[in-house]
Amino acid sequence: MAAASRISSLLSRSLLSKGRICGVGRSVVCSYTTAAALEKPITPSINVNYTKLLINGNFVDSASGKTFPTYDPRTGDVIAHVAEGDAEDINRAVSAARKAFDEGPWPKMTAYERSRVLFRFADLIDQHTEELATLETWDNGKPYEQAAKIELPMISRLIRYYAGWADKIHGLTVPADSPHLVQTIHEPIGVAGQIIPWNFPVLMFAWKVGPALACGNTVVIKTAEQTPLSALYAAKLLHEAGLPPGVLNVVSGFGPTAGAALASHMQVDKLAFTGSTETGKIVLELAAKSNLKPVTLELGGKSPFIVCKDADVDKAVELAHFALFFNQGQCCCAGSRTYVHESVYDEFLEKAKARALKRSVGDPFVAGIEQGPQIDSEQFEKIMRYIRSGVESGATLETGGERIGNKGFYIQPTVFSNVKEDMLIAKDEIFGPVQSILKFKDINEAIRRANTTSYGLAAGVFTQDIDTANTLTRALKVGTVWINCYDVFDAAIPFGGYKMSGQGREKGIHCLSNYLQVKAVVTPLKDPAWI
């Protein structure tokens, strides 16, 4: 995949493909139908081999011996039982990471040697795309084509991006006013604790692990309890690439036990968290109350997608549909507030409704499926409550709003019109396939309403006028503005939020600073020829 290719264009191309998916099915669904999610689910053609904790280079049982089930969201059936880590296991993992950092060899390797390990890891990801994508789909419910053709190529590209950075991290020689040689040195920060979410499990694994390892740190990562399988497999590949024991440790477990223990651990030097804003507040508090470790947070969003009066309505409808419904709507930067200029509102609404009705929903292992099930029963019920809230508050339910079948967690693509700012569906992060369409009169009104939220992760702007685009991009209080595109996630593009959408940035050069300390070294100069 070319570095600057849009996810949306890749998705469009991938959904035209036909043939077998990971050796288990052959079918193309061309239009939305409840029958697609009612058929007997395809059985994945791989075995789940990695379900234990990864500590000090070995897959081990939890200290308590406990396990927990991870479920297939297509059916609610158990896929496997996974070792359940808790505070004692976090201690074991942090001890391994601490020793690997303090005694080496990882931070003592040359940067070039570290980069070679990461390059080999990227190659192994490409070689094992089928296994990783299958685990991702099975555990998460996202379409296999999305995982295999969009996300896995992004992951190997990102790992290569940070592998390339490893031997290019350097300081400066700083001119001083006195006869002193002044240097700045960028050093790895130490043991990095990382907590990743369930919506993009292996992609978030790469976003966290890639820059941390490139900078010479060691890592303890806690996976989401809903989706532990792909990260464990990816960690196995990293060790196959030559990563020394203890450098990367993976603990599967729950937030109140394993997550809290990691956030508050006194031997963890830095913490990175991706998840909800509510949990992010807890993580930040635990970090502050322990050893005041620095924290980066990539949190929730309620991103506006603004369709201006000069927009090509057909293109705007398709892009707004993608911005909201991608990944079952389970995306922190989803364009979940669709603002449409009053002059094109009616046309946009009818076409948005028609597009939702054409969305293919069903078994994510079937070729051509755009939307699989939601992650689990808890998220399913949360989304359904928001849909009921929208109806009760007076929004117009244009289409969808119901469950598909009685097994698994499928929800009809849902579109609301006549949405007002004070409705919960316009204020809260639903994290599901629910599009809220709002009407506006002029750009100043759109800016004011778009910014009236505690979130500030992303925004979309659809216009043919460069002056309008420039005005909106500078006025919107968000970390990313996509103009006439959406969800462009090049490895070099920084990603993160304003306000309660987080602090710090993922990806790109800016992410490296999350995992580095800057040290100034000052040495007297005796009789210098020049200063």
Image (cartoon, grey):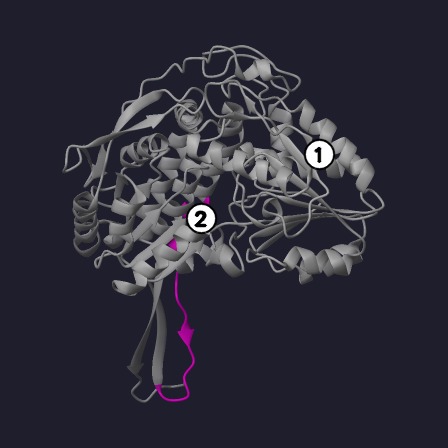
Q: Which residue is mark 2?
A: 276
In the rendered image, the vertical position of residue 13 relative to residue 294, given as above or below: above
In the rendered image, the vertical position of residue 383 relative to residue 94, given as above or below: above
Q: Which residue is mark 1?
A: 318
The answer to whether one can see residue 50 in this image is no
Residue at x 59% of width, y 42% of height: 487
Numbered circles on residues, count: 2
Mark 2 surroundings: few (<14), some (14-19) or many (≥20) residues within 10 A: some
Q: Which residues are magenta?
A: 161-179
Instruction: Tell me: 338 left or right of 294.
Output: right
Question: Amino acid type of disc 1?
Answer: Glu
- Front: mark 2 or 1: 2
Instruction: Tell me: 461 left or right of 492.
Output: right
Residue at x 54% of width, y 46% of height: 429
Question: Amino acid type of disc 2?
Answer: Ser
Q: Nearer the viewer, residue 196 or 484?
A: 196
Instruction: Tell me: 272 left or right of 491.
Output: left
- In the rendered structure, does residue 54 fall within the stretch colored magenta? no
x and y, in percent, of residue 353 in the image:
72, 30
Label 2 residue SS: loop
Q: Nearer the viewer, residue 247 or 55?
A: 55
Question: Split into 4 quadrants, where in the image is the C terminus?
Answer: bottom left
- In the rendered structure, does residue 174 fall within the stretch colored magenta? yes
2 and 1 marks in contact (CB < 8 Å)? no
Place residue 129 in its image quadrant.
Answer: top left
